[in-house]
Amino acid sequence: MKILYIKRKTKYEKRHSLKMGELTTKVTYIKKYLFGLPIKTLHQYRETYYGEVKDCTDCMLFV
């Protein structure tokens, strides 16, 4: 078992953008793990309908 490793996980989330409104998109999280426990989220990005990769700072979680 590794002590420190980085893992990437993709899941579908409902997000809200000011320009488009509500959208369901694939969000990828890159996290750092220590002994299997998540320590820090290094980066998160989303994939658009057209295949572009965008940062998640411009859209909020839709509750």
Image (cartoon, helix red, strand yellow):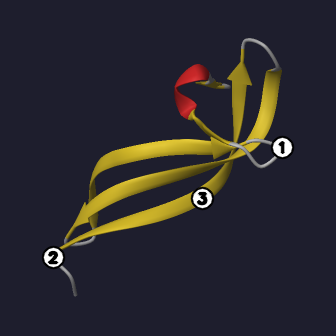
Circle 3 residue = 10
Q: CA–CA distance between discs 2 and 1?
A: 37 Å
Kind of residue at badge 3? Thr
Residue 12 vertical position relative to residue 19 in the rendered view, above or below: below
* 62 or 29: nearer the viewer: 29
Circle 2 residue = 3
Q: Kindly identify the residue that appears in the image at 27 percent across and 63 percent down.
A: 33
Q: Position of residue 46 (x, y in %)?
A: 63, 43
Q: Is residue 3 left or right of residue 45?
A: left
Q: Quadrant of residue 49?
A: top right
Q: Kindly identify the residue that appears in the image at 56 percent across and 52 percent down.
A: 28
Of helix, strand and loop, which one carries label 1? Answer: loop
Q: Nearer the viewer, mark 3 or mark 1?
A: 1
- Badge 1 local density, few (<14 within 10 Å), some, or many (20+)? few
Q: Is residue 46 left or right of residue 29?
A: right
Q: Kindly identify the residue that appears in the image at 29 percent across and 58 percent down.
A: 32
Kind of residue at badge 1? Tyr
Circle 1 residue = 49
Residue 8 vertical position relative to residue 51 in the rendered view, above or below: below
- Badge 3 local density, few (<14 within 10 Å), some, or many (20+)? few
Count of numbered tags:
3
Q: Position of residue 13 (x, y in %)?
A: 68, 43
Kind of residue at badge 2? Ile
Identify the disc placed on residue 61: none
